[in-house]
């Protein structure tokens, strides 16, 4: 596996950075991306490229740079993403479009840019970093759940469409990890006159606490490394605390209203 060329979106911090550092320690050739290279002048863990997943020109420029330099892209890890919180009714539609642009359309743009190269290589691997939140509609986090759920479903379709080209595509859904996503996500303001004020405020505190007490992102990096070494990757992988992963099992086996009650109790609603 050593020497394989890896492209990681959102590689300057959090889960993306952890994946890049770990894979470089295993002698992969690692390229990460960031929306603003000027903010990371002292970054030296691996090569960072300027790329905005919402801008197809910047995507093509970065992909061309790697192809010109390395001659190939073996692994794409779609990690770049943003968070969003708020009641469905109160979330400005422009913010809904933005989060879909980054979390769903962005990975699609990346995949479309690398697939021709992987097809010509007759091999390649795409790992889409989704989320355990993408398996369920979470209160006041519904749009984040929707973006990650949509990415998970499109991955299932892509696997079947690309199976004859030697290209492997899979999902990796993390639970809560200690990253800066809470600081960078869009929050619908907690307004005094909002009918959702009390419940939204309670849920927001719970979500922030989960991220603050989240696991080390190195666990995600190690799972990525295992997937890379797998001959026939599964459709879905999960990484996180036991109960976070078990929540997906519960959703599959419990009646909908019983599962809904569990979520309401979890978020103290």
Image (tube, helix red, strand yellow):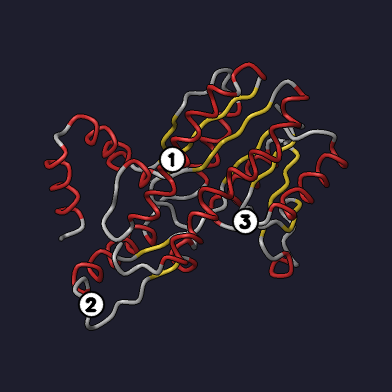
Q: Residue at x 49, y 63 (%)?
A: 180
Q: Residue at x 29, y 61 (%)?
A: 140
Q: Which residue is mark 1?
A: 173
Q: Position of residue 116 (x, y in %)?
A: 73, 31
Mark 3: secondary structure = loop
First in sequence, mark 3 or 1: give its number: 3
Mark 1: secondary structure = strand
Vertical placement of 135 versus 192: above or below? above
Q: Which residue is mark 3?
A: 54
Foreground label between 1 and 2: 2
Vertical placement of 156 versus 186: above or below? above
Residue 48 visible in this rendered orientation of the protein: no
Alpha-carbon span between mark 3 and mark 2? 32 Å
Q: Which residue is mark 2?
A: 194
Q: Residues within 10 Å of mark 2 (few under 14, many from 20)?
A: few
Q: Position of residue 174 (x, y in %)?
A: 43, 44
Mark 2: secondary structure = loop
Q: Residue at x 83, y 39 (%)?
A: 67
């Amino acid at each position: 596996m050593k020497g394989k060329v890896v492209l990681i979106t959102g590689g300057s911090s959090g889960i993306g950075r952890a994946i890049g550092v770990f894979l470089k320690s295993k002698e992969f050739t690692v390229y990460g991306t960031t929306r603003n290279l000027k903010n990371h002048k002292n970054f030296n863990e691996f090569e960072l490229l300027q790329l905005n997943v919402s801008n197809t020109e910047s995507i093509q420029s970065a992909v061309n740079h790697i192809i010109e330099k390395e001659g190939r892209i073996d692994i794409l890890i779609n990690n770049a993403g943003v968070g969003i919180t708020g009641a469905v009714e109160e979330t400005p539609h422009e913010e809904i479009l933005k989060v879909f642009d980054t979390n769903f359309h962005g990975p699609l743009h990346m995949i479309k840019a690398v697939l021709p190269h992987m097809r010509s290589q007759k091999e390649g691997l795409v790992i889409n970093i989704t989320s355990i939140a993408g398996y369920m509609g979470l209160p006041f986090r519904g749009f984040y759940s929707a973006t990650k759920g949509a990415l998970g479903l499109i991955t299932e379709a892509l696997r079947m469409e690309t199976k004859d080209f030697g290209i492997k595509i899979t999902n990796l859904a993390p639970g809560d990890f200690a990253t800066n996503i809470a600081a960078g996500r869009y929050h619908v303001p907690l307004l005094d006159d909002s009918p959702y004020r009390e419940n939204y405020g309670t849920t927001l505190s719970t979500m922030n606490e989960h991220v603050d007490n989240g696991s080390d992102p190195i666990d995600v990096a190690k799972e990525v490394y295992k997937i890379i070494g797998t001959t026939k990757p599964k459709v879905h992988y999960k990484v996180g605390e036991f109960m976070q992963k078990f929540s997906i099992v519960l959703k599959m086996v419990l009646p909908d209203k019983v599962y809904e009650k569990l979520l309401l109790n979890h978020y103290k609603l």
